[in-house]
Image (tube, rainbow, N blue to C red):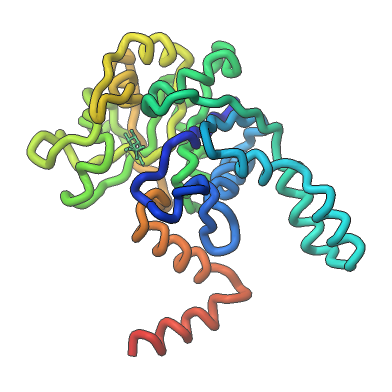
Amino acid sequence: MKAVIPAAGLGTRFLPATKAQPKEMLPVFNKPTIQYVVEEAVSSGIDDILIITGKGKRTIEDHFDRSFELELSLRNSGKIEALKEIEAISDMADIYYVRQKKQKGLGDAISTAKNHIDGEPFAVLLGDTIAQSNVPCTKQLMDIFYKYEATTIAVEKVPEEKIERYGIIKGSCISDSVYKIEDMVEKPSISQAPSNLAITGRYILVPEIFDHIKEVEPGVGGEIQLTDAMKSLDESYGYVFEGKIYDIGNTFEWLKSSIEIALTDDNVKYDLRQYLMELLK
Ligand code: G1P
């Protein structure tokens, strides 16, 4: 299975930090956000990744490319551990790029992947969203996808005040954590939301989605919404995956993710815990 990582959005929720740099390159603890996303795809067994970029996103390509000067300098100064880490980033997967020429929404971004996908089911991992779990979120979705052979979306129960930020599904629970989807609405108001199950940025899509995207009219925000295209698929499932999701496009979520991920790192967790305890005394 191939993966598609949309990373073309403007990052308007995180200005001024994203004025001249892609939100997907914002570091979370010690790595850019999109590196976590690529690592999730790779650890799910995917080695062919298409990143959808746009204007101002060139540093994403540089990050996953070789960096000969840096490698040489690290080698010459004997920093072999750092060298290995840098080389691993460019060796991780076969990464391809396509540019979305106009910001016309997530559905439109996905449609630029059609030729690369070539008629097979594929995974979508939003480039500004980190999923932390023991079994990678995309791998969990793939398992559900192969069981039901239909579009499968990661969903998460969200508190009422967050509903307006997400696509929300309506579904009936058919087995542990799996919902058969009956309807979905992009960014509904609380009163119009059919449930509190939010679409979280990880999908396994069938290739028919490209025809459905072509048919949809601009929706919320005047954009071609992936949610609207998925709604007309014959069959789809929502899966409450085991793990945690961080939407980095949101300042507070980004801050939380950096702290929580740092608290899992052996080199800093002790000092950070001490520091936070002192700070909050
Ligand atoms: C997109 C999707 C939305 C989903 C969200 C998850 O919205 O359109 O359905 O719930 O990602 O982060 P965006 O955040 O790009 O506006």
Q: Residue furthest left?
A: 191
Q: Quadrant of residue 156?
A: top left
Q: Quadrant of residue 150?
A: top left
Left or right of 37: which side holds 232? left
Residue 42, image x, y percentages: 63, 40
Classify 281 as above or below 101. Answer: below
Classify 213 as above or below 80. Answer: above
Q: Residue at x 41, y 58 (%)?
A: 254
Left or right of 19: which side holds 29? right
Residue 35, image x, y percentages: 59, 48
Residue 135, image x, y percentages: 53, 47
Q: Quick one: 132 or 179, which is closer to the camera? A: 132
Residue 261, image x, y percentages: 50, 64
Q: Quick one: 213 or 20, which is closer to the camera? A: 20
The quadrant of the image that shows the N terminus is top right
Q: Residue at x 53, y 30 (%)?
A: 52
Classify 83 as above or below 197. Answer: below
Q: Residue furthest right?
A: 76
The quadrant of the image that shows the C terminus is bottom left
Observer able to see residue 45: yes
Q: Residue at x 36, y 45 (%)?
A: 12
Q: Quadrant of residue 222?
A: top left
Left or right of 231: which side holds 190? left
Classify 275 as above or below 12. Answer: below
